[in-house]
């Protein structure tokens, strides 16, 4: 158990809909990362937050957005869903941004299926 | 972030030692080197992190030469359950702090 909790584990929804994925980081970790992994594809970095503020953006579509709340949990919002958005979405957390303690701990992921 | 290069795939047999080398020629002075393991449909799992020389934990060793332009993950006596994708990352603590995963090395352990 990595200490990172993602909910829900599975989600099936229709095209055009909007969903919210939730992540609770490890206790004390300030940094949260979101990734998308399609079948047999690599991990695509989407976005990172540190202590409530957006830190870095990767290949995140405009239809997607995220935020980190004061209690440090994070949500990833996916809207106007398309079939191609079907993927595993991972959240990770780490304690620091630089030097030691930068290792990330990943949740078990949310499997999103768009039909 | 420093770019990394590692073999796309490797094959091994149970009981053998496996060494996976990662090249990172543009590593910065304050960058750490971190390795992750990922099984299908699971999130990556942290294996080991180091800055220089050698680091060892209960699952692996990490060898880093003096110039730090490469690193080698060593897995002693692999088993079938070590079949996974292994990722080398550097610069995780860089100015942007984000984690960028490359394609990794797919290790296949055969009986």
Image (cartoon, helix red, strand yellow):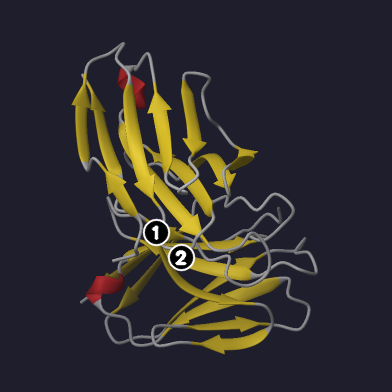
Horizontal arrangement in the rendering, residue A15 relative to residue A74 (left or right) = left
Chain to which the residue tagged by mark 2 belongs: B
Q: Which mark is residue B61?
A: none
Residue with the mark numbered 1: B44
Whether A54 is drawn above or below A27: the answer is: above
The quadrant in which the C terminus of chain B is found is bottom left
Q: Residue A83 appears in which quarter of the rendering?
A: top left
Q: Toward which corner of the image does residue B28 lie, by quadrant?
A: bottom right
Residue A34, x across and y down, in percent: 46, 43
Q: Are marks 2 and 1 in contact (CB under 8 Å)?
A: yes
- Mark 2 is surrounded, within 10 Å at the Cα level, by few (under 14), some (14 to 19) or many (20 or more) other residues, namely many
Question: At 51% from the left edge and 23% from the top edge, which residue is drawn?
Answer: A61
Along the viewing direction, whichever of A16 and A30 lies nearer the viewer: A30
Q: Is residue B95 left or right of residue A21?
A: right
Q: Earlier in the sequence, mark 2 or mark 1?
A: 2
Q: In the rendering, at what x and y percent does residue B12 appear?
A: 34, 75
For label 2, the SS is strand
What residue would you read off at disc 2? B36
Residue A16 in view (yes/no): yes
Above or below residue B62? Residue B110 is above
* Residue A114, position as x, y percentages in the image: 25, 22
The residues bearing labels 2 and 1 have C-alpha atoms spaced at a distance of 6 Å
Q: How many marks?
A: 2
Q: Residue at x 30, y 28 (%)?
A: A86
Q: Quadrant of residue A56?
A: top right
- As drawn, A99 above or below B98: below
Q: Chain of mark 1?
A: B
x%, y% of residue B74? 48, 82
| Residue B8 visible | no
Q: Residue at x 57, y 72 (%)?
A: B21
Of residues B103 and A66, the one drawn nearer to the viewer in this rendering: A66
């Amino acid at each position: 158990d990595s200490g990172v909790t993602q909910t829900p584990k599975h989600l099936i929804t229709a095209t055009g809909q909007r969903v919210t994925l939730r992540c609770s980081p490890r206790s004390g970790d300030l940094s949260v990362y979101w990734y998308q992994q399609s079948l047999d594809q690599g991990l695509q970095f989407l976005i990172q937050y540190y202590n409530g503020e957006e830190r870095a953006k990767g290949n995140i579509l405009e239809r997607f957005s995220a935020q980190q709340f004061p209690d440090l949990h994070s949500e990833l919002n996916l809207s106007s869903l398309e079939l191609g958005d079907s993927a595993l979405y991972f959240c990770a957390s780490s304690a620091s941004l630089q030097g030691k303690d930068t290792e990330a701990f990943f949740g078990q992921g949310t499997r999103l299926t768009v039909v | 972030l420093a770019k990394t290069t590692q073999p796309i795939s490797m094959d091994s047999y149970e009981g053998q030692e496996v060494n996976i080398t990662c090249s990172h020629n543009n590593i910065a002075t304050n960058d750490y080197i971190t390795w992750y393991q990922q099984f299908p449909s699971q999130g990556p799992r942290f294996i080991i992190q180091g800055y220089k020389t050698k680091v060892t934990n209960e699952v692996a060793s990490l060898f880093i030469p003096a110039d730090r332009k490469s690193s080698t993950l060593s897995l002693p006596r692999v088993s079938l359950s070590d079949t996974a994708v292994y990722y080398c990352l550097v610069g995780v603590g860089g100015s942007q702090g984000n984690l960028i995963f490359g394609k990794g090395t797919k290790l296949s352990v055969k009986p």
